[in-house]
């Protein structure tokens, strides 16, 4: 059965499954673990012929059309200079094309609340700082001694307007580990 | 087309905003944008909390048995939605509706101390701290907890000094952050 809205959208009760794309890039760095079989669709929202959202017969809902979501890492060599902005060099996921690989900036595609998390490992005097619209908004981790290593895990939420942007910087020119030890995730949450 | 139920509940589309909407008692409660896949629930409680003012927070010189409730505040209008209950009790988030919440805390220590998420005044979340920091090295920690809460539960962020290294100190100036979001 389908309910057809006048603007071209439909709400369809179905017994057929629909294929679902993978979430992770397959560059060998992270497991390609999310390319799983999706349970049979039970109720789906469509726009024209495109499925958008699904409630499956196991009562789990799936955003088939993904909202803005970013996952980047520093996968290359350690970043050892006073990088501003911090050069994340590998994009695992960017569902709304908000990441600019030239400016290392994530521009908010649509207004709303986002969850931001960043994780680093550093081992020479340095300060890793998450930034919002060009200004620091958390003062990161400070390491001082060459013989000490320090990890930094940070998470917060923020109400953003389309066009706002996030970056990070390595202040004081210390060593921020590459090799996927340093990464950032930004996700639309509502 | 719209589907209408009892009590002014409905499912309908709004072509101007490209949204499916579910209205409960005539109030739009769930909006799905079919162009970008975003779901907006304007009454879902979310709060971002900054440490009050620009000053550092001293955790006192008392023993660890004397925890201190951090002076949190909502930093500016627009940094929370769906609830006005944050201020019902000073520095306390009073859970407005039962459900699953994600609670996060990110801090920067300037001298050794502990910090944790407290439920109804008691130590509850995993205690964390930075014990090795001194005048020239700073330590940050982050923790995130997902749990079920009852309406009326009180969530606070608390800390104290390390007994061996009194005068625990957190950076103010917005460097210490908390967030609470209802997940469903």
Image (cartoon, rainbow, N blue to C red):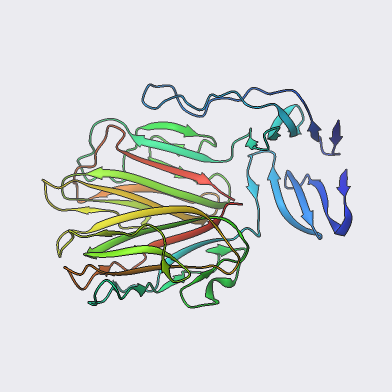
Q: Is residue B136 left or right of residue B50?
A: left
Relative height, residue A178 to residue B15 (above, below):
above
Q: Name the foreground residue: A38 vs B67.
A: B67
Relative height, residue B82 to residue A79 (above, below):
below
Quadrant hosting residue A42: top right
Q: Is residue A132 left or right of residue B39?
A: left
Any part of residue B167 in sight = yes
Query: Residue B91 at x, y = what percent?
Result: 46, 74
Query: Residue A184 at x, y = what percent?
Result: 39, 42
Any part of residue A132 in sight = no
Q: Is residue A3 left or right of residue A164?
A: right
Q: Name the foreground residue: B29 vs A13.
A: A13
Q: Residue at x 22, y 36 (%)?
A: A78
Quadrant hosting residue B59: bottom left
Query: Residue B160 at x, y = what percent?
Result: 29, 70
Relative height, residue B92 to residue A142 (above, below):
below
Q: Is residue B129 left or right of residue A117?
A: left
> How many numbered badges does the structure rendering display?
0
């Amino acid at each position: 059965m389908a309910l057809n809205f006048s603007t071209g959208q439909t709400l369809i009760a179905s017994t057929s499954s629909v294929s679902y794309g993978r979430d992770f890039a397959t560059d060998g760095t992270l497991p390609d673990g999310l390319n799983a079989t999706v349970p049979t669709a039970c109720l789906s929202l469509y726009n024209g012929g495109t499925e958008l959202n699904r409630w499956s017969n196991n009562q789990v809902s799936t955003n088939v059309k993904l909202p803005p979501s970013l996952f980047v890492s520093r996968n290359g060599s350690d970043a050892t200079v006073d990088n501003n902005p911090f050069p994340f060099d590998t994009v695992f996921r960017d569902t709304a094309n908000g990441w600019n690989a030239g400016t290392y900036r994530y521009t908010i595609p649509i207004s709303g609340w986002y969850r931001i998390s960043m994780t680093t490992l550093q081992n020479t005097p340095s300060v890793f700082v998450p930034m919002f619209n060009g200004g620091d908004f958390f003062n990161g981790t400070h390491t001082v001694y060459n013989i000490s290593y320090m990890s930094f895990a940070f998470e917060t939420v923020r109400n953003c307007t389309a066009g706002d942007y996030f970056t990070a910087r390595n202040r004081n020119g210390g060593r921020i580990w590459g090799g996927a030890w340093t990464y950032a995730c930004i996700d639309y949450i509502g | 087309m719209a589907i209408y139920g009892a009590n002014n509940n409905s499912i309908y589309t709004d072509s101007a905003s490209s949204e499916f909407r579910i209205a409960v008692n005539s109030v739009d409660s769930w909006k799905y944008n079919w162009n970008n896949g975003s779901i907006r629930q304007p009454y879902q409680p979310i709060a971002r909390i900054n440490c009050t003012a620009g000053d550092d927070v001293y955790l006192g010189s008392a023993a660890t048995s004397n925890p201190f409730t951090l002076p949190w505040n909502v930093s500016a209008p627009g940094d929370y939605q769906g609830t006005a209950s944050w201020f019902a009790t000073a520095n306390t988030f009073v859970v407005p509706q039962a459900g699953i919440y994600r609670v996060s805390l990110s801090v920067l220590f300037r001298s050794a101390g502990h910090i944790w998420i407290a439920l109804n005044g008691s130590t509850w979340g995993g205690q964390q701290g930075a014990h090795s920091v001194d005048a020239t090295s700073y330590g940050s920690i982050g923790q995130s907890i997902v749990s079920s809460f009852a309406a009326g539960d009180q969530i606070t962020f608390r800390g104290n000094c390390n007994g061996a290294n009194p005068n625990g100190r957190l950076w103010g100036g917005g460097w210490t952050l908390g967030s609470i979001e209802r997940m469903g």
